[in-house]
Image: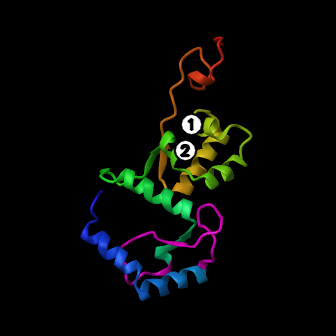
Amino acid sequence: MKRLSDRQLMHRQYLQSPAWKAKRMEALESYGCVCNRCGKYGTDVHHKTYKRVGDEHLEDLEVLCRDCHEAHHAIERSLRGKKNGSKAYHVKAMFAALSEDQKKMLQETTGDDLHFAIMYKRSKKCDKLRNKALELLGGDRWYGLPKLKKGYHESPKHYRPSIKY
């Protein structure tokens, strides 16, 4: 099992303090119990920045549902050690990081299979869908669509028809 750093231990202690509990309640009263990313019910208060921990401003915080909060931190963990600080997501990682509620919400905006639309299909509609997924995950850009092979449909092998066009 991984040991927590001193900074992580101090942060966890802070989250148990009366000062944080008061600030958390202030954020919930100000923003309401609505997830800032997906619009569902949420009561997790997330630090957008850790620069003023202990003296947070309301704009440093956002309300998230549990799924969006866990997805955000999972993505953050996967990006640790990246040099440029940009949050760029491969479409496969982006799809995997979406919570079930986020996937349901995105599915309502497309008539296609969501997995297919995010990871393979090339269209303006699907670009908007990927951008919405990126927004839900707090990313800067996405990449990783498969390259088209001449003479084939634009989908991956298991979606390709058996005939060439």
Q: Which residue is mark 1?
A: 119
In the depicted view, which residue is nearer to us: 70 or 121?
Answer: 70
Q: Report which residue position mark 2 lands on.
A: 95
Label 1, residues with CA under 10 Å away: few <14, some 14-19, many ≥20: many
Tag 1 and tag 2, C-beta contact below 8 Å: yes
- Spot the residue most to the top: 163
Q: Position of residue 164 (x, y in %)?
A: 63, 11
Residue type indicated by callout 2: Phe
Report the residue at 54% width, 23% height from top.
Answer: 148
**Disc 1 residue type (three-letter):** Met
What's the CA distance linking mark 1 and mark 2? 8 Å
Indicate the quadrant containing the N terminus: top left, top right, bottom left or bottom right: bottom left
Q: Quadrant of the C terminus?
A: top right
Quadrant of the rendered image containing residue 65: bottom right
- In the image, residue 139 lies at what x, y percent? 48, 54
Q: Residue furthest front?
A: 1
Residue at image location 58% in from the left, 33% down from the top? 120
**Is 61 left, or right, of 12 in this rendering?**
right
Instruction: Write down the region rendered in magenta.
Output: 31-58
Q: Residue at x 48, y 58 (%)?
A: 72
The rendered magenta stretch, by its main secondary structure, is classed as: loop
Mark 1 secondary-structure assignment: helix
Picture coordinates of residue 40 (x, y %)? 66, 65
